[in-house]
Image (cartoon, coloured by chain):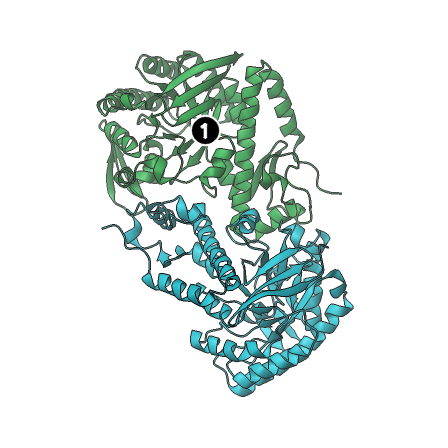
Chain colours: A cyan, B green
């Protein structure tokens, strides 16, 4: 163990926060973007590359890993860090979100959720206790309570029922985490704020969780189909109700713009499949917005995606070549575009951290939005 | 241009040869294995990785590139070296082999071959002259004459007809290559020995080509379905009939054992999709033979493929993890196993070169065959 979990704030700029998390596997500069390693791999990337881009932490998906290769197997093999050759910090989700979105024959009760695997139809039970147990088997540094995340829009009574259930599951998760010795190993368990798009429920959830001894707090149940302005409005009411001295993690978010606007509202951690998934579908994120390499206008364009980038993938290959790789269905397309996208996301985070430290976050935010609005550079003509 | 094409022999050990090719894009230590970059990419590898493994030259497939993205387009974009970000030596085939194996509605005449693209059904004509023209547009350093390669077994008269046609096409290819200024750019055009599994036809082909001013000579029409002993018997009669002072390239070969045995018979250059294709299908080549990572016996095996390898892919990831990636269909499986396989192939070539230099090739050959025969290390038990 390097050090037990801790968080300290280094600077504030408006609501934006610059901080540092320490975990048993290293330091995490915040605001942080955490690449998603669903099945114990950040798709189409070598782990060393992910690290070199500046990622201090990656996310593993409990639902996927419990089904394949199995949490007990990963534990026998030395834990998830060893298994996936990532010696730095790992955050795992509770598995609940993907049980509800991917598994079959789901049945939710006070006790937990029963479901069938989407891979082989095998039956499983997920409870708050079992979720923590699996995350302990994986050995992740930052673990999540099991919660119920419902799709929006939804009636207030459904949102409130799910939020109250999530609070009761928060207590059970915490008890299990302490029983299993998580704090003694320096690990963290985060509580998850729910409450849908209902401001008073968000505030009630944040306050109730804030009275429980979690090492950090997540905002769940956003980026589940609601418009961006609803998401940001929810952050506007939620983050002020969250503890100041604990990290705040907005789950499953988002686009570069979502992240910029959420940092402006006091969020410290993010994860999203967007940069990796988009990379496998021919889409690049750059300083000047998105570039769809499938588009035929790139077929004869000798320019790289961004000649000023530090990332070889964005700098050393022409748009014409990337277009060709995408059209030909070559694996190198996903490899280069995922690399480009994760590089851009990490650059954005690094620049935001510097801007907050230097008290110029508002200028940075305006300039960045301006660059995006400028759009992709015009093709040759 | 670094230097015009040249070849010199540095050492002989029995029939095995250690040499060096120089091309406008660098030096090629022989015997050389040339990774296949079919569609302007060595599948699942960054070009920098391919280079770091010790590859001095990669192969591009004229048939694929002429159809997508098109040879004229690649020329406008600065040639294949620039297009695929590989500033080292490139060898291209003539396109003929894949016209006959992939294209539709093929019709072969004295003039050439008409065919339809397997991608979009578009009509094309491939002649000896057009093949050279395309290779000139690509700008490859080492180019191949168009030939007719027939599947074995085949009647002698068919084999002889194809061999004689290939000789006439050799003359036309050479004329076109000189007309287009290939020699002045320091490029090479290789003639291709045909003759199937008929010794006197192989010898006649080699001798006739040897009288034409090619910079190098290929052995074609082997590894097309015949048993290994037939292939080696053909090399036994063919290489002694080939010029001593020119490089000899055995096209499309092969397994590590094929390569070892062919080097023993005086071959200098090889290409094969085997290490890259196998890597995408869960198969690893190691010092101790092949390992099929799909096999369930690897699911709990914490050992790497080869703890003594210099290649991070073979050294830093457990068999259990590789098995998981293969079963989960993750792109990282292909990335790590292709890397492992190309690393092993290049290590084999490097070791053969050293053994020839030091006059101990026969010992190396025996020891290597012994290691392969030993088979994969036993699983944990």
- For the view shown, which residue lies furthest in the front direction? A358
Where residue B161 sits, quadrant-wise, is top left
Question: How many numbered marks are there?
Answer: 1
* Residue A110 in view in this figure: no
Q: Quadrant of the N terminus of chain A?
A: bottom right
Observer-nearest residue: A221 or B203?
A: A221
Please give the chain letter of the residue carrying mark 1.
B
Q: Is residue A361 above or below residue A50?
A: below
Which percent across, then down, holds residue B190? 34, 22
Vertical relation: A211 (above or below) A29: below
Name the residue: 65% across, 78% down: A209
| Displayed quadrant of residue A150 | bottom right
Residue at 52% from the left image edge and 33% from the top image edge: B53
Residue at disc 1, secondary structure: loop
- In the rendered image of this protein, does residue A224 appear above or below residue B205? below
How far from the left and from the top, in percent, is residue B130?
24, 31
């Amino acid at each position: 163990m390097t050090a037990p979990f801790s968080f300290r704030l280094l600077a504030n700029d408006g609501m934006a926060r610059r901080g540092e998390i320490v975990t048993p596997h290293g330091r995490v500069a915040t605001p942080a973007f955490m690449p998603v390693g669903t099945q114990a791999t950040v798709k189409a990337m070598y782990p060393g590359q992910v690290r070199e881009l500046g990622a201090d932490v990656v996310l593993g998906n409990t639902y996927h890993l419990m089904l394949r290769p199995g949490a007990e197997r990963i534990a026998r093999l030395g834990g998830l860090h060893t298994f996936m050759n990532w010696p730095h910090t790992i955050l795992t989700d509770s598995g609940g979100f993907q049980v509800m979105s991917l598994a079959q024959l789901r049945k939710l009760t006070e006790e937990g959720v029963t479901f069938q695997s989407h891979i082989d139809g095998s039956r499983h039970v997920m409870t708050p206790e079992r979720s923590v147990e699996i995350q302990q088997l994986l050995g992740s540094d930052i673990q999540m309570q099991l919660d119920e995340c419902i799709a929006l829009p939804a009636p207030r009574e459904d949102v409130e029922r799910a939020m109250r259930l999530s609070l009761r599951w928060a207590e059970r998760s915490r008890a299990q985490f302490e029983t299993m010795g998580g704090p003694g190993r320096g690990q963290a368990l985060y509580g998850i704020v729910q409450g849908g798009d209902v401001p008073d429920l968000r505030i009630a959830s944040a306050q109730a969780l804030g009275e429980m001894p979690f090492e950090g707090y997540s905002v769940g149940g956003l980026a589940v189909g609601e418009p961006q302005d609803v998401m940001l409005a929810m952050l506007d009411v939620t983050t002020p109700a969250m503890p100041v001295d604990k990290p705040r993690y907005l789950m499953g978010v988002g686009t570069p713009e979502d992240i910029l606007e959420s940092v402006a509202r006091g969020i410290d951690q993010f994860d999203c499949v967007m940069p990796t998934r988009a990379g496998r579908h021919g889409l690049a994120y750059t300083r000047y917005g998105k570039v769809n390499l499938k588009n035929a206008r790139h077929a004869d364009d000798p320019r790289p995606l961004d000649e000023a980038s530090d990332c070889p993938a964005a700098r050393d290959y022409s748009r014409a070549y990337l277009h060709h790789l995408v059209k030909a269905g070559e694996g190198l397309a996903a490899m280069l575009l995922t690399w480009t996208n994760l590089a851009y996301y990490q650059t954005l985070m690094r620049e935001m951290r510097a801007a907050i430290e230097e008290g110029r976050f508002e200028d940075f935010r305006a300039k960045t939005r301006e660059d995006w609005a400028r759009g992709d550079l015009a093709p040759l003509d």
